[in-house]
């Protein structure tokens, strides 16, 4: 670090312009703290390049000066992957100014967007040409496509459309050495060698900075039906899924489950959400059917399946949404889980995925073991049951979490219970939230050492200086580096 | 190579059993020549391990003795990726004995299979539990799943279900150092670090040997409708695709196009296939709609779209298949293209993919340029128009191809025309067939040097000895190696 901070700022300003470098005395707060306020870091500068070429120039400059680079999308991540550490030599790169929709093709069903586009803007750009971009998640009003790609985002449409990885056709990426990977091709198939672009999807910015992407579009859903089911257990939800698959084939759009405790946490703390049904059973399942054609009656087949399921003792009750407003009111409950949990206590959340058959055993065992170990915890659950991904959340009284060390121990204890049960059921500890900082220690503990070995090899290959989002996913900072 | 060939054979027999090592004096012919007879290699031994552990033991032995390893599936590949070179130190590893369906779960919609399973067997195992495995291609009666994964196979169902990559949930792979990558997880989502399994899909056996996989299953199509359309040009096919998407949404299952010359080549040379329609226009489009529900009338909406399209001048004629037999007769033409071409001359085939909007310009330009350069060639075309992937095939009189050097020059000349036009249209030279030996020189010529650089890095990382399927995709044999 031969130069002064002032020199660094001046040189970064020379690349991106005076107005797009925020130094540490400026308004960095929104960029050096994650949205949940769990991690606070430090940056020499937060820079906002205006083009892919400028991103590459900033990266080359950082490599030259051995500054660590932290790419950041909308800063809505769940695991701290976009927050710098408290070192003195971090540069945060924001993609906000790369916000153009470069192309939309309703014929090819593709959209080409820059990384800083907000997810909701991409959805809207698709809708404007009578197409559908299916990725949907709580933060869609502020998260950015580059972050969605770098975290391989999931959400409520995975059951039918897959995670972000399945929606990406082409990618442009600034590599850790400043070279530009030019895979921005609108090709539905491409077998010309190794699938390099796949490496960058879900790499949490550790292998380069996604600057643009070609994404798949779909025919929009034009008919839908929605119901809320009251269930005794998770097993019933899976049996109902089976029946729905038989009855409506691939019209099954969403299948979201919540525990009674989860809904109660929302009811108690989120005043603008009304629970539009009575809480009489331990589990609640939202079923949404969609069809890409208008005028298809999906209520009728849904009612038949639900009535048969009730006759067979698989559900206590079922409410078919009779209007769009009623459907929205039911979805509003599901979309309030993060808010409700945050307001209900200190959140220890999990993102395990297990084979579908194992979900019932998984949630039963995990809940029992957490309650046995931490009797004062409140366990609430919600998730994507068709994906094998139920989020188990332990809510802890904030009073008990005033001491950081005690809290860390408590979190570690709960994590270990969840991780052990996940492993026992053949699952993985992160379905969609990623690893970042939060889950780095857990991954190191549960992962096959061979996998970690290969990941380190890939990291070393692409980022030999270890400067690109260092220490995310796994520890990689090299001795002697900043 | 300190030991004698006899020692090598004895040690390999000690690993896999006496009956499963075929030495060079034995019946190796089926394994050292590709199915089209274009490449002939040599092997010290063809071995057939009986388990993943035996595959790993053979690999470790080969690495120890610096023998090159050539993994081979059903030997139905299009680019010679599974054929050994003519060196003295190759060991071909066949997966035939890894043929178990380990698990089928209609609840989770997954099937776990070993790499040696024949594709048609996997399809049948899915059907047996009322599920559907969509991958479908000409060689499905003899190709193996391990090969399908290693080549990221395409086929006629990509439009709706994607290529093989989209169908793989988990993978088990023996790495080039004999370690076993244990990614055989039936998880719909997994964000625990880099997407390592993606590296092996489509790597043509150069990064390891796939030994087992967890694959996605789907609800079977239970209703369908099929039509054959007579068109003046490719542009009309794309416009009809647009109309179909609007009218039937995602019920569009297949969209396969053939040039008149393609069908004539079949009519002239494949006696068991009758063309069930008159040839009156330059292009023919097969449209298949499917629905996962039984009893859905798809003929009616299809007839409406086709009638409107004819009114709008987008099609000269349309034949709606009125029976399953008629639909089969139309598909029989499409499935005979390889046979018809092989019988019609020396085949110079291409597998370019371009953005959908560029397909019409691509085929027009390519045909004109080939005919200008090689007036005696017969250009026939068939392909997956919804994927942007039309196979351009130049058929050459066999009389003109008796001299290998002249033939090679002619092939190179035609390839260059196709490659240049592919690049001009923003495409890639291999959509689904891969690179292997056939397209290695072409890839080196057209690929971004950065991509090749990254591929070499990945290869070096996983296979530092360069022994795993050497010289496929790109030249990697190291000086001093066998």
Image (tube, coloured by chain):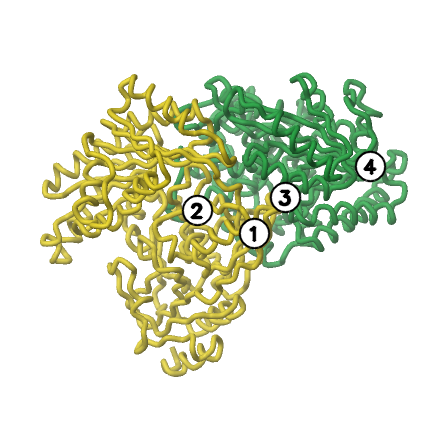
Chain colours: A green, B yellow
Query: Which quadrant is home to the C terminus of chain B?
Result: bottom left
Q: Which residue is mark 4?
A: A395
Tell me the CA gap for discs 2 and 1.
Answer: 30 Å
Q: Which element type, helix, strand or loop, lies under badge 1?
A: helix
User: Is residue B423 visible in this depiction of the protein?
Assistant: yes
Q: Are marks 3 and 2 in contact (CB under 8 Å)?
A: no
Marks 3 and 4 close (CB-CB < 8 Å): no
- Residue drawn at 52 percent across, 39 percent down: A208
Label 3: chain letter: A
Residue A431: x %, y % from top left: 64, 42
Q: Are marks 3 and 1 on the same chain?
A: yes
> Which label number is shown at residue A312?
none
Residue at the disc numbered 2: B135
Q: Report in which chain the residue with disc 2 lies.
A: B
Both labels 3 and 4 in a single chain:
yes
Q: Determine whether label 2 and label 1 are within 8 Å by CB.
A: no
Sequence-wise, which precedes: disc 3 or disc 1?
1
Residue A414 x %, y %: 80, 46
Between the C-alphas of marks 3 and 4, the distance is: 26 Å
CA neighbours of label 2 inside 10 A, class few (<14), some (14 to 19), many (20+) = many
Discs 4 and 2 share one subunit: no
For marks 3 and 4, the one nearer the N-term is 4
Q: CA distance from mark 4 to mark 2?
A: 45 Å
Mark-to-mark CA distance, 4 and 1: 33 Å
């Amino acid at each position: 670090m031969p130069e002064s901070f002032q020199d660094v700022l001046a040189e970064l300003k020379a690349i991106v312009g005076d107005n797009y470098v925020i130094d540490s005395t400026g308004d960095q707060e929104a960029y050096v703290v994650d949205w949940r306020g769990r991690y606070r870091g430090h940056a020499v500068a937060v820079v906002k390049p205006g083009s892919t070429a400028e991103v590459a120039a900033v990266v080359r400059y950082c490599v030259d000066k051995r500054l660590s680079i932290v790419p950041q999308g909308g800063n809505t991540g769940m695991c701290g992957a976009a927050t710098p550490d408290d070192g003195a030599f971090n540069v945060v790169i924001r993609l906000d100014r790369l916000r153009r929709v470069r192309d939309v093709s309703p014929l090819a069903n593709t959209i080409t967007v820059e990384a800083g586009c907000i997810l909701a803007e991409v959805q809207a750009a698709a809708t404007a040409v009578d197409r559908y971009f299916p990725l949907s998640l709580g933060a869609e009003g502020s998260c950015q496509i580059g972050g969605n790609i770098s975290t391989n985002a999931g959400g409520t449409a995975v059951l039918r459309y897959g995670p972000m990885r399945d929606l990406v056709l082409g990618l442009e990426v600034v590599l850790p050495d400043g070279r530009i990977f030019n895979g921005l091709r609108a090709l539905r198939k491409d077998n010309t060698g190794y699938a390099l672009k796949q490496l960058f999807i879900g790499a949490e910015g550790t292998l380069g900075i996604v600057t643009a992407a070609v994404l798949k579009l779909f025919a929009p859903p034009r008919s839908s039906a929605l119901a809320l089911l009251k269930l005794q257990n998770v097993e019933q939800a899976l049996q109902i899924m089976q029946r729905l698959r038989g009855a409506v084939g691939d019209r099954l759009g969403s299948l979201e489950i919540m525990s009674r405790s989860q809904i109660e946490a929302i009811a108690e703390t989120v005043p603008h959400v009304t629970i539009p049904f009575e809480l009489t059973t331990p589990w609640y399942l939202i079923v949404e059917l969609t069809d890409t054609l208008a005028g298809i009656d999906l209520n009728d087949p849904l009612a038949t399946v639900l009535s048969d399921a009730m006759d067979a003792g698989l559900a206590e009750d079922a409410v078919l949404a009779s209007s769009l407003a009623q459907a929205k009111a039911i979805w509003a409950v599901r979309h309030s889980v993060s808010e409700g949990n945050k307001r209900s206590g200190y959140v220890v959340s999990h993102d395990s995925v297990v084979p579908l058959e194992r979900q019932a055993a998984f949630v039963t065992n995990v809940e029992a073991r957490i309650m046995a170990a931490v009797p004062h915890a409140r366990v609430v659950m919600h998730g994507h049951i068709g994906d094998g991904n139920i989020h188990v959340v332990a809510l802890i009284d904030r009073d008990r979490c005033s001491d950081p060390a005690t809290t860390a121990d408590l979190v570690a204890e709960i994590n270990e219970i969840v991780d052990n049960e996940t492993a026992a059921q053949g699952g993985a500890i992160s379905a969609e939230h990623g690893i970042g900082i939060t889950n780095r220690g857990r991954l190191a503990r549960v992962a096959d050492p061979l996998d970690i070995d290969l990941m380190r090899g890939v990291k070393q290959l692409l980022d030999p200086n270890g400067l690109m989002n260092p220490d995310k996913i796994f520890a990689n900072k090299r001795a002697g580096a900043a």
